[in-house]
Image (cartoon, rainbow, N blue to C red):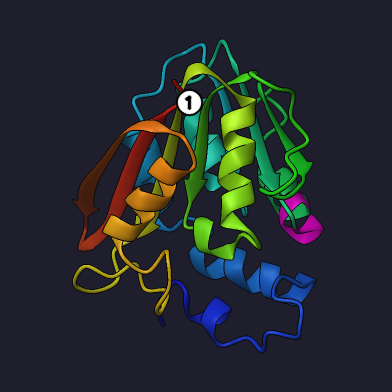
Amino acid sequence: MNYHDNHDNHDQNTPIWDDKTAEWYAAEFGDHISNALTIKNAKLKQDEHLLEIGCGSGSACREAAKIITEGTIIGMDPTSAMIRIATENTPSSIVQLEYLLGSAENLPIENDSKTICIAINSLHHWNDYKKGLAEILRVLKPRGRLIISDEIVSGDSCGHSEGPLSKPTLVIEEIKRAGLVNVKLETFEEDGDGIYLFRAEKS
């Protein structure tokens, strides 16, 4: 089953991320290679102030905590079940990491407070990606970075049917349109799985 199938097959009128779905998702994809690949190539520093939007079971946040030992990490997700799962899976010794309930469109974060925002396989789940990108611009410090990564599904597709986020070139256009600069696209692969990794900055 594809990483995105569970999202795509849901009826639009039913909640996607109920407790049962969250448990299934965490078990199936919580440690998906895209999490480690993204953090490995994010060029993190020890003193970052990182926000992950759509942290799921917290796998990427825990990976980032191995590097960010003198800064702060916030894993944010709009699903309370995911926050519970992430918290349960995180040792109390990782004191620089906390999880918050919140959505990309209304980040419970102060202006100009983060050095980096990361979204791994979550952009297409946002209710309004334009609002989400505007919120990221608000919370990033000047010269702060945005990293969006997405699983490479087939060909040049991001695997999300037609629309403004269906291809990497279109995602780049939307990031630029949001007001971020120095937008770049790279691809990384490990053990047969690959990701698109979009980098951008706040001017």
Q: In which quarter of the image is the C terminus?
A: top left
Q: Is residue 87 above or below residue 40?
A: below
Q: Does the magenta segment cover residue 61?
A: no
Magenta segment? 79-83
Numbered disc 1: secondary structure: loop
Q: Where is residue 169 in the image (x, y as percent from the top left)?
A: 27, 57
The residue located at (74%, 47%) in the rendering is: 88
Could you tell me if residue 54 is visible in this image? no
User: Relative to the observer, which residue lies in front, 179 or 152?
Assistant: 179
- Tell which of 129 and 186 is nearer to you: 129
Nearer the observer, 153 or 82: 153
Q: Residue at x 67, y 35 (%)?
A: 91
Is residue 165 placed above or below 91 in the rendered structure?
Answer: below
Residue type, numbered disc 1? Lys
- Residue on which the image places disc 1: 66
Q: Is residue 109 visible in the rendered structure shown here?
A: yes
Residue 30 rendering spot, x and y as whole percentages: 53, 58
Q: Which residue corresponds to the image point at 66% horizontal and 21% vertical from the top-left?
A: 96
Secondary structure predominantly adopted by residues drawn in magenta? helix
Q: Where is residue 107 in the image (x, y as percent from the top left)?
A: 73, 39
Quadrant of the drawing holding the N terminus: bottom left
